[in-house]
Image: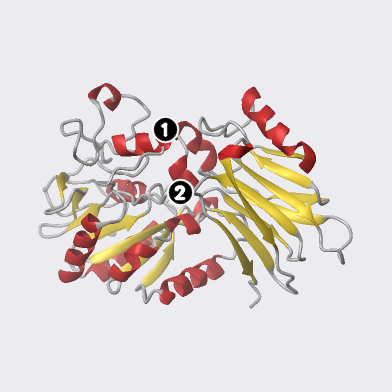
Amino acid sequence: MPNRQRELKGLTSEIKINRCYGCGVILQSDNPMDVGYISKDRLNLEDQLCERCYKLRHYGEVKQNSPSFGESYIKLLSDVNKKDALIVYVMDAFTIEGSILKDIHPYLQKNTIVVLNKKDILPRDFPEDKLVAKIRQVLKQDNVNPLDILLISSAKNINMDEFMSKLETLRKGKDVYFVGANNVGKSSIINKILKNYKNKTDKLITTSKYPGTTLGIIGIPLDNVSYMFDTPGIFNPKSVISQMEKEILKYIIPRVQINPRNYQLDDQNSLIFGGIARFDYVSKNQKEKGKCGYTIYMSNDIDIERTKLSKADNTLVSIILQNKTHPIAKSIKEVKDLEKHEYILPVVESGTINITITGLGSIMTQGKGQAIAVYAPKNVEVKIEHIDYRA
């Protein structure tokens, strides 16, 4: 299987399965009470959301049979552990905070490999070794000690040979299960595997409900006795990606390498990100003089408007009404549709303060005791973290 560019036998080169773009569940139009339901009149539309995700995004409703992490995933992972299969925990290398799913960590106590996908979009000179160390530390706090952590890009075919070699060695002839949050690229990794590597069986791709659960999974044969399984992406309500409609995700999810954008701001200045988020530099520490630098790490496709804080509310409304910048969300009409988070940043002698809007990106600055405010879509997590890569 590690030989690249070999002809596939018994498999198509790409998985042709309809999944909900919101949560990754396999879509079906037969049973309205079952997970993954979509009405037949919407099944062929580009905007393919299951009923659950559609109601969540447009009406704020969440059904109890949500495909989020719950009993179905607990049963699945418990069974995976019993048969000693290999778990591939996929994360988005750029939006790590939206990829970490602490609920599944108790079920990743052994035979787990972590894959950080989308290496190609990380900014130039990004300290990748520090990122891997950070992930290992976060997982260790939950008693998860992965067999390995790899940075790859399925889109650019970066480190895929190394990944496949590790996969073949660590699975020891057993099944492989890919798990992770929605939109981290699990299915794209599997599609790349199908295009690059030859399997040794005539078995066909299968789709089925996992026994005793509502989860729809895709099984791809690796050989005559083992499969790799693509499971639905776990819905993370704390991420911007889970809150926004499909047509604007192309602006939010980076497609090419991130170009950091630098701003020197006076206090009482604001930055507006498209029409979906805002950052306010409210006031400086009384001991500080001059401007403060802020570096924005977000998709290059997100437009940023700089304005005075006193004009920020009206500017946001104007941006949304004119609909000339990206992204603009249907659910956000004015500042009251966003949730305000206020902070006094700590004073630090080294390193930087990382202000993260989960799923959207981050704002890096020096910690000088300044007052800031972040406006993000409701329920989206905003985090403040001190990072010192010299430590």
User: Taking the image as drawn, is residue 232 in sight?
Assistant: yes
Measured as percent of width and height from the top left, residue 7 is found at 24, 46
Q: Position of residue 242 (x, y in %)?
A: 43, 44
Disc assigned to residue 58? 1
Q: Earlier in the sequence, mark 2 or mark 1?
A: 1
**Under tag 2, what secondary structure?**
loop
- Label 2–label 1 contact, CB within 8 A: no
Residue 301 seen in this snapshot: no
The correct choice, above or below, for 300 with respect to 265 in the image is: above
- Which image quadrant is residue 34 in? top left
Give coordinates of residue 281: x percent, y percent: 75, 52
Q: In this figure, which residue is indicated by the disc labeled 2? A: 156
Out of 154 and 117, give the one closest to the viewer. Answer: 117
Q: In the shown orientation, is residue 192 left or right of residue 27?
A: right
Between 151 and 198, the residue placed more toward the observer is 151
Residue 391 percent across, percent down from the top left: 63, 78
Q: Please, is residue 154 above or below residue 384 in the view?
A: above
